[in-house]
């Protein structure tokens, strides 16, 4: 009993103290507001308004979501589905018909993109401007698309190896259904190339649109008074064009030692324009280099090689095989190859050779390394551009011995073969492309001879004279 009384007494005591404290707090608060009122009343007008603005600003700031993410934030923009690419017309019988756009496709199915636009219902399209360091996996993560799907797409990307190597300046567009299913993925590779992966019957089908644009020729001329590089640059030629010139004539003249002050050069360059914009793709068509002692000439033939005015080859002929010795073909080129399990057509765009890991791989022709990279399916790979027309690809390498932009001679060691990427055993996948389309490297009609073939001679002379006329040059 006395215990209960003492508890009650304690409770009253504590309650009393609490009440005292609360009273004290309110008194203080009253005093504070009083002071504040006096302060504000005495404040000049300007200061008062500044104070109010600051308060509102602080209020807004505190309600805004935090901008700090641990994950990198890739800038994206939501765009409405492109309805311009397909337009609907009502046919006489009243049925709707989709008119397809007239961009030249390299591969099948431009209709796929249009099908999706036509069946659009609440799909959302997001667009990304690729900056240095952006990767497709980060973008997928940000959009909530599964990593497994990305793997599937990268497999499909084996032919173009663009997805795994997004470059600054490129654009990536995703079309996503309300159920977060990726309906299509588009990479605007450059002005000329647009690559699209479209979901069709549960599978992603690729389509590369290549705009040919227009090629216009320009003449550049100059005189040597320093180095060829500096004078050619001053004449308006780009680094890659200068590289093409020196590569074309490298067997004839040493540009560093054999040129003298007063030597003259005339160069004809074809440049690609799309919608009036220069794509940065160019090809040196003709070179006339007049030194005190001799005139050197180079003319691009239809086969993508340079010949002198008499039709003698300047660049070395191509070689058929990118390795020395003999190795078994483990899987031939086959555009209609069916997948052994899925029974779907999955073309084999190259020729597989059973090269043991570490075997030397050589470039089959002169050219420039246009890509070196790693790809989940292709493994370590190299792409060499030999001319406007010809490109070769070397996949599943263990080591690349060249870098992007490097000038390559025929027969130059470029890599060690390997077993990287989606590969079931050590082999080299070697691929030959003409205008971006894979052809059978074992059957393609390669320029293998040193001279312009007799059959092409008349055509070559005509072309040479046309180039000379454009350059305003006459050879004696
Ligand atoms: Zn292969």
Image (cartoon, helix red, strand yellow):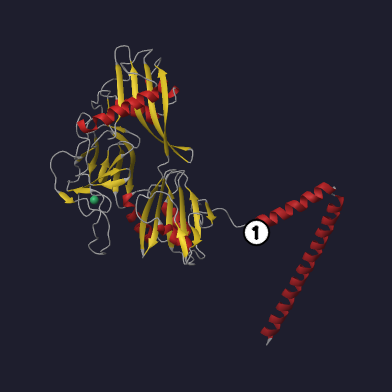
Residue 166 picture location, percent across and down: 41, 47
Residue 433 quadrant: top left
The answer to whether 263 appears left or right of 414 in the picture is right
Q: Residue at the location (31% across, 26% down)?
A: 464
Extreme bottom residue here? Answer: 1
The answer to whether 46 appears left or right of 280 in the picture is right
| Quadrant containing the C terminus in the rendered view | top left
User: In the figure, 92 relative to 49: above or below?
Assistant: below
| Quadrant containing the N terminus in the rendered view | bottom right
Extreme front residue here? Answer: 92
> What is the secondary structure assignment of the residue under circle 1?
helix
Residue 137 quadrant: bottom left
The answer to whether 386 appears left or right of 172 in the picture is left
- Of residues 343 and 104, the one nearer the viewer is 104
- Of residues 11 and 175, the one nearer the viewer is 175
Q: Mark 1 highlights which residue?
A: 63
| Total marks placed | 1
Q: Residue at the location (30% across, 25% down)?
A: 298
User: In the figure, 230 relative to 373: above or below?
Assistant: above
Residue 428 picture location, percent across and down: 22, 46
């Amino acid at each position: 009993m006395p215990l209960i009384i003492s508890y009650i007494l304690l409770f009253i005591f504590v309650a009393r103290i609490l009440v005292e404290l609360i009273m004290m707090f309110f008194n203080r608060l009253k005093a504070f507001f009083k002071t504040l009122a006096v302060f504000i009343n005495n404040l000049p007008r300007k200061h008062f308004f500044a104070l109010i603005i600051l308060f509102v600003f602080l209020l807004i700031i505190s309600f805004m979501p935090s901008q700090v993410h641990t994950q990198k934030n890739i800038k994206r923009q939501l765009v409405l589905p492109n309805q311009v690419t397909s337009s609907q017309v009502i046919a006489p019988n009243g049925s709707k018909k989709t008119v397809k756009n007239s961009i030249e496709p390299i591969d099948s199915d431009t209709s796929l993109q249009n099908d999706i636009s036509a069946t659009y219902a609440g799909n959302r399209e997001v667009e990304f401007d690729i900056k240095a360091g952006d990767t497709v996996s980060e973008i997928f993560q940000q959009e909530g698309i599964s990593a497994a799907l990305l793997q599937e797409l990268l497999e499909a990307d084996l032919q173009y190896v663009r997805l795994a190597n997004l470059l600054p300046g490129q654009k990536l567009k995703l079309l996503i259904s309300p159920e977060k299913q990726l309906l299509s993925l588009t990479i605007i590779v450059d002005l000329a190339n647009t690559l699209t992966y479209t979901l069709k019957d549960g599978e992603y089908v690729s389509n590369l649109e290549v705009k040919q644009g227009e090629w216009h020729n320009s003449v550049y001329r100059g005189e040597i008074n320093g180095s060829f590089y500096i004078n050619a640059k001053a004449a308006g030629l780009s680094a890659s064009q200068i590289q093409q010139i020196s590569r074309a004539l490298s067997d004839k003249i040493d540009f560093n030692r054999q040129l003298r002050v007063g030597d003259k050069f005339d160069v004809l360059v074809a440049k690609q324009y799309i919608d009036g914009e220069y794509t940065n793709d160019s090809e040196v068509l003709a070179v006339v280099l007049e030194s005190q002692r001799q005139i050197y000439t180079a003319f691009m033939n239809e086969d993508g090689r340079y010949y002198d005015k008499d039709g003698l080859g300047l660049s070395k002929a191509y070689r058929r095989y990118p390795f020395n010795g003999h190795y078994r073909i483990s899987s031939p080129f086959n555009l209609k190859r069916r997948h052994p399990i899925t029974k779907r057509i999955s073309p084999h765009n190259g020729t597989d050779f059973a090269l043991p890991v570490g075997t030397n791989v050589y470039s089959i022709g002169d050219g420039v390394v246009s890509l070196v990279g790693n790809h989940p399916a292709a493994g370590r790979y190299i792409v060499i551009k030999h001319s406007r027309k010809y490109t070769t690809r070397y996949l599943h390498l263990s080591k690349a011995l060249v870098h992007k932009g490097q000038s390559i001679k025929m027969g130059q060691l470029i890599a060690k073969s390997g077993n990287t990427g989606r590969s079931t055993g050590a082999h080299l996948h070697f691929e030959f492309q003409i205008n971006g389309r894979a052809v059978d490297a074992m059957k393609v009609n390669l320029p293998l001879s040193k001279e312009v073939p007799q059959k092409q001679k008349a055509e070559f002379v005509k072309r040479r004279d046309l180039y000379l006329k454009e350059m305003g040059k006459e050879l004696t």
